[in-house]
Image (spheres, grey):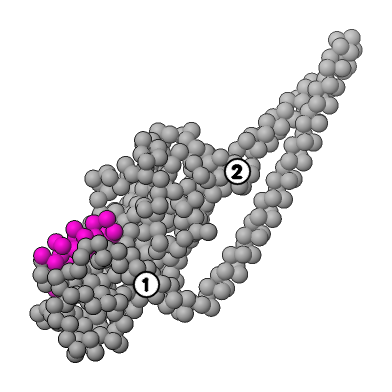
Amino acid sequence: MTPEPAELTTPRILALDDERQIHASLRLRLANIGELVACSDPQAALARLRQESFDLCLVDIHMPGMDGLEFIEQARQIDPGLGYVVLSGHGTEENLRRAIPLQIYDFLPKPLPDRAGFERRIPEWIQRTKLRRRELSLVRDSGALAQDLDVARIERDIEFTASESARDALLQSANLLTTIHALLASATRSLAAREKQDASLGSIYRSLQEAAKTAEAATSITEGFFNSAYANRDTSPAHLGGCLNHAISICQRWTRAEQEQKLVDVVSAEPNAIIHGLSGIEFLLLLIPALGVALELAPPRSTVQVRVEGVARLDTASRDPHAQGFVWVNRRQSAHSSPGILLRVRASAVALDHNQIKDWLEAAPSSRIRLPSRGLLHGLTRCKGMLGFAVAPAFERFELVLALPT
């Protein structure tokens, strides 16, 4: 079962406090849990909420200009699903009364409680936010979700029936071709001796030879399919070279790339690599969203660059200095120490921001990207790979990195 998209991304925590020593303490405590964004000014924090998505917000009560509870009231208008933990050295009865309708998770005194107890509760609070978001999304989109589920089931049944029927037909054709080739080869050998004695049989002999060659070529083509990445949708190996070429071809049709003169330039140092943990079909379904989103966003008359390199460890991708500030999907569940490949996709499009990435991964109605991400998320989970996005405004241009085990 594929996890929810929100469960595959690194948690992001917003901390609002006018004391910089609190920021430093939180960075130390949360370094191994998630990404911390620290703000000293409530208005600046509200601006970040309008632009980015967070999984938890830690808020001080007493700040100049706007207290923490006023901030939460305004922040809930921007992001109704976000959860809050209040930090305060003044847990007065009045503050507790005002906090009740805001449904905050907890009041924590200053200075912060012991490190172990505090760190242990952070994942619990983050999970509550994810559950709250899921509930709000289900309420908002219940009708559309039900319809999409029905359509997805129908499409899957049709695709499965069609692919299995085509495979069975091709298998029967391959068996018939093998028989025809054997009969033609036998007839050619029989006629060879007689053709030397009767010149009138020459044209028939040559026709039989050509027919035998054609049947042999057709047999080779069908054998090639059954040795390919798609012969068995569940077990055929995921060949990088063939699947990458097919994914590009499909994406170009989906995104009308040829009409808009969008090109794809591929440089691969690992054309014969086989992706571990995926069948050929699953790998193709993973690649199409990753390449398709770049082609869809790329401007007309531009080139999308695809670069593939081998690495000794998958976590080479996230440790690359260039990737500092990337948003990572499935990083915690990935096979960090496994050898693999890094597939980098770059386009001349503007880099996506946090909200745009989140909307696409969660198939939000507001997403401006048409290609669904479902196959990509399923594939990452299956093979324990990870996906990194360059995020605006830290990056100007679109870029993503797939780190996949081999």
Per the image, the residue denoted by label 1 is 128
x, y (%) of residue 186?
84, 21
Left or right of 118: which side holds 126? Answer: right
| Mark 1: secondary structure | helix
**Image coords of residue 319 (percent x, y):** 27, 45
Residue at image location 33% in from the left, 65% down from the top: 123
Quadrant of residue 260 in the image? bottom left
Q: Residues within 10 Å of mark 2 (few under 14, many from 20)?
A: some
Which residue is under mark 2?
Answer: 235
Q: Which residues are magenta?
A: 21-41
Q: Is residue 358 left or right of residue 108?
A: right
Q: Is residue 321 above or below residue 189?
A: below
Residue 259 seen by the camera: no
Given residues 167 and 236, the one toward you in this image is 236
Occupied quadrant, residue 297: bottom left
Please state which of residues 199 and 108 is positioned toward the viewer in this rendering.
108
- Could you say where residue 403 lies in the image, as x and y percent from the top left? 39, 45
Residue 177 place in picture, x, y as percent? 77, 34
Residue 93 image-quadrant placement: bottom left
